[in-house]
Image (spheres, rainbow, N blue to C red):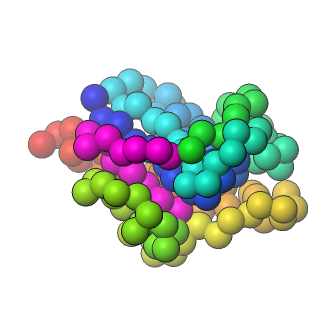
Amino acid sequence: MIKICFVCTGNTCRSIMAERLMKKLLKDNKIEDVKVSSRGLMAKGDNISDMAKVVLKKLKASASNRKSVKLKKTDKDTLYVVMSENMKSRVSSSKIITMKDLIGNDIIDPYGGDEEIYLKTAKEIQSANKILLQKIISWREL
């Protein structure tokens, strides 16, 4: 079993979109041995943002409500994927990569932005998730 946890600031936009989009990608590719979650460095139990739900629906991923969850401790068996380079030092794990490692740039926080900004963010996340999925497939073959 491979475990992945996407991490952003509040766990209401980027990381939850990454989680839901990765779950859809795994389902579409009939991969069942990967567990995906998301957390926020400063999450306060807020609901997923309304605009994130709109974009997830457009991309045919789950847009159901969920309260944000704070990253309190890390697990040595989980790969943590952070949305920006500056978050890397705030996650104490030896298994950590950034979105920049996958697609060459950080994922900008769309919080408070319009649908266009959220959709752009979600598409960048999708690109990164596809690259990550290819890495997962190659790891499984080792």
Residue at 32% x, 41% y is 75
Q: Is residue 53 above or below residue 10?
A: above
Instruction: Give residue 26's position: percent from left, percent from top.
Output: 46, 34
Please identify the quadrant where the C terminus is shown. Answer: top left
Instruction: Give residue 140's position: percent from left, percent from top.
Output: 21, 38
Magenta residue check for 78: yes
For this view, does 141 lie left or right of residue 34? left
Instruction: Give residue 133's position: percent from left, percent from top.
Output: 39, 46
Please identify the quadrant where the N terminus is shown. Answer: top left
* Quarter of image, res 62: top right
Question: Which span of residues is magenta-colored?
Answer: 71-83
Q: Considering depth in this image, is 64 or 92 the residue closer to the camera? A: 92
Q: Is residue 106 above or below residue 93?
A: below
Q: Considering depth in this image, is 139 or 37 the residue closer to the camera? A: 37
Residue at 44% x, 63% y is 90
Residue at 25% x, 43% y is 76
Q: Considering depth in this image, is 76 or 72 the residue closer to the camera? A: 72
For this view, does 5 lie left or right of residue 24? left
How many callouts does the rendering have? 0
Magenta residue check for 55: no
For this view, does 64 lie left or right of residue 27? right
Instruction: Give residue 35's position: percent from left, percent from top.
Output: 41, 31
Residue 58 appears in the rendering: no
Residue 82 appears in the rendering: yes
What secondary structure do most residues of the magenta stretch adopt? loop
